[in-house]
Structure formats: C-alpha cells, structure tokens
Amino acid sequence: MGIFSKTCEYAIRAVFFIAHKTAGQSSRVGIKEIAGGIDSPEPFLAKILQDLSRKGIVQSTKGPNGGFYLDAASLLRPLSDIVEAVDGDDIFYGCGLGLKQCSEINPCPLHNEFKEIRNRIHHLLQDTKIGEFNDELITGILSLKK
Amino acid sequence: MGIFSKTCEYAIRAVFFIAHKTAGQSSRVGIKEIAGGIDSPEPFLAKILQDLSRKGIVQSTKGPNGGFYLDAASLLRPLSDIVEAVDGDDIFYGCGLGLKQCSEINPCPLHNEFKEIRNRIHHLLQDTKIGEFNDELITGILSLKK
DNA sequence: ATAATAAAGGATGTTTTTATCTTTTATTAT
DNA sequence: ATAATAAAAGATAAAAACATCCTTTATTAT
Ligand code: FES
Ligand code: FES
C-alpha cells in the first residue's frame, strides 16, 4: 500500500491519461484505450470512471465515438479533487498514527512532523492541476504505465 | 486509510506504549494493558505483537509477571524498523501513483515532488527512536489513544 | 427506424485486511 | 510437582478493497 489506495492511483493516472488524450480537440477516449494506457484492469477502471463521472470530475458520452473526456473547467481542477472523491480527506487532516482526531492540544508523538508532511501533500495536490502535464505526457517524457 | 495500514498504526502506538511503560525498570507490560492504553482490539494487537516479537523488535516473556518489554538496544531502534516490518518499504521507495518502479528516467507526473515527500517521511522515521518520547508520554503531554 | 457502439448500472466473485477465538507452551510461585 | 499466569500458535470469521461479468440505456451512423 502506498500513500493512496489502488483505486485512487488508477483514478489519478486515468484522469491524466484522458486529459492529455483529449485536451484541445473535442475528442473522446474509450475505456479500453485508457486501461491499456495506464496498465489497469479494464472492468475495475470502468467502475472507477463511472464514479468520477457521476461526481462530475470527468465527462463522458455513450455511443459511437463516445468515451471519456475533460471539459475546460475540469482540466483546471486540482488533483486533490480526485483524491478527496476517491480516498476521502483523511490523508489531508487525519492523524498519522490513527488517533481518532488529530489534535494540537493532545497530540500523538509524531504530530508536529506529520502535520508538515501532510500539509506538503495537501499543497502538492491542490497546486497540481489535472491538465498540467499534458505536454510532457504527449511527448512521452512522463509515464503513466509500467 | 492514512499513510500507514491500521496494523502499522497499532504497532507503532503499542511499541511507544511498551517503551514508556517499561523503560529503565526491568518491568513487563501485558497485552491487556497495552491494548487499553492505545485503544486497540486486544486479540488483534496480540497477533501484531507476536509478529514483532518474532522479528526481534519487541521482547517478551511468558508466565506470571511476564509480558512485553524493550531492551536497551530496542529502545534505540528507529521507527522505520517497525514500519518496514509491518508495511514493507513501499512507502520509502515506491511510486506515489503506483507505477511498478519509481524511476528517474521514465517517471510519473508527480515523481519530483513525491520523491521529496517520501524522503521526508523516510528521514522522519529513521531519525525518530522508539524510546524518544518516553518522558512526554509519562507526563501525559503526548497521547497514544482516542 | 434499425443496428452498432460505448458507457451506466447492477449483481457477483475474489483477495486482503482487520479481527476473534481456542489450544498449546513457557514461566513463575506455591 | 502443581497450579496459575501470560504469551505463542493456529484456526476461523467479518469487513473492506479489489475485480469481473451481464444487462440496460443513450448516442450515432446507416
Ligand atoms: S495527533 Fe497524530 S498527527 Fe496530529
Ligand atoms: S515514478 Fe512515480 S514517484 Fe517516482
């Protein structure tokens, strides 16, 4: 297990993939191509995107030439929106040692250091936009698979 | 889910608890008291400590006046030893987006930022010793429960 | 209108994590 | 030696995460 659940890892990679494949042109990309592009189990990813679609984080249309895409507004959203939608906000606010409440007045031993790490993760995800890496993904400098 | 698995959260809290309860005197503390002291399910924690005991991270003796304790060497070990024993080293070396290999030459979009966060977590856990918070835990400034 | 396409929805299955319970073994005190 | 204690070991169970499959609905091209 890493920082995120597997579901969330797939979700982030999939959204990055959709972003760079459909930005600009009004094109769509299908579940098969996405799953192939990010090395994820296709039916499981379908469920994840179905959920993100319901929540308005990605857009989709059915039928021929249908598929997933991102509108201009979606491309500007921060990654934290995806993480919060999938894993919740525990990673941003929860106690690192699992106490029910992270508290300043009765903290766990790692509180001070953890708070900073947590905040750094939070800021990273808030400052990173979904469409931010499109160029590097198109040129292949960055990778979403293997 | 936070940064660590629930098992690992219990493990760290339990080891801190044993440390501050038994440091100095050659006393032992039983599973019941530990579970109560860190708000964890007793039989589950028993399994976790059994595992840590096999791995030499905590010490134990059976029978009357028996229980768990930490020898001088164990008190000086870094928290990273516990995390590695329970959750493995994915959190120290794994890709934040779940790629099979974190790589400098074909990195995921978040690699550069992630690497720093990961390293910070690693250093925190390497620099923090198991016995380091005993005083603050005894005085109650720091908390391991609720 | 009809057939083809692709996501949505719903039901189900598997694996891993989290948790409990019972029996055995080691240690101590009597 | 014997009884009492407390962890170790092993078997089992519940819940959550991860994953698949089948049917339905919306869209498009013919
Ligand atoms: S109390 Fe544990 S991180 Fe704040
Ligand atoms: S490749 Fe993803 S963190 Fe290094």
Image (spheres, coloured by chain):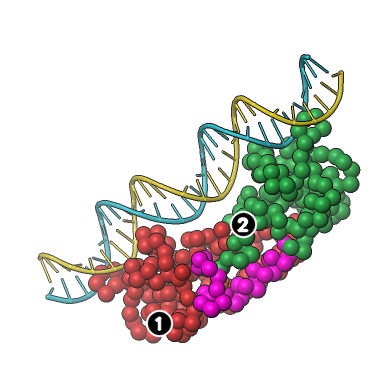
Chain colours: A green, B red, C cyan, D yellow
Q: Nearer the viewer, mark 2 or mark 1?
A: 2
Labels 2 and 1 share a subunit: no
Q: Residue A73 lies in magenta, yes or no?
A: no
Q: Amino acid at mark 2?
A: Gly
Circle 2 residue: A88
State the extent of the magenta-drawn residues as a range: A98-125
Distance from disc 2 to disc 1, alpha carbons, whole Å, reads 38 Å
Residue B60 vs residue D25: left or right? left
Q: Secondary structure at mark 2?
A: loop
Label 1 sits on residue: B23
Residue located 82% across and 52% down the image: A73
Amino acid of disc 1: Ala
Q: Nearer the viewer, residue C6 or B8?
A: C6
Q: Quadrant of residue D28?
A: top right
Residue at point 39%, 79% (across, down): B21
> In what element is the residue under mark 1?
loop
Residue B76 seen from this side: no
The reply to whether callout 2 and callout 1 are in contact (CB within 8 Å) is: no
Outermost right residue:
A25
Residue drawn at 34 percent across, 71 percent down: B33
- Does B130 sit above or below residue D29? below
Position of A18 relative to D1 (above/below)? above
In the drawing, does residue B128 fall left or right of residue B16? right
Residue A21 position in % (x across, y down): 83, 45
Q: Position of residue A107 (x, y in %)?
A: 53, 76
Q: Position of residue A76 (x, y in %)?
A: 81, 55
Q: Is residue A26 visible?
A: yes
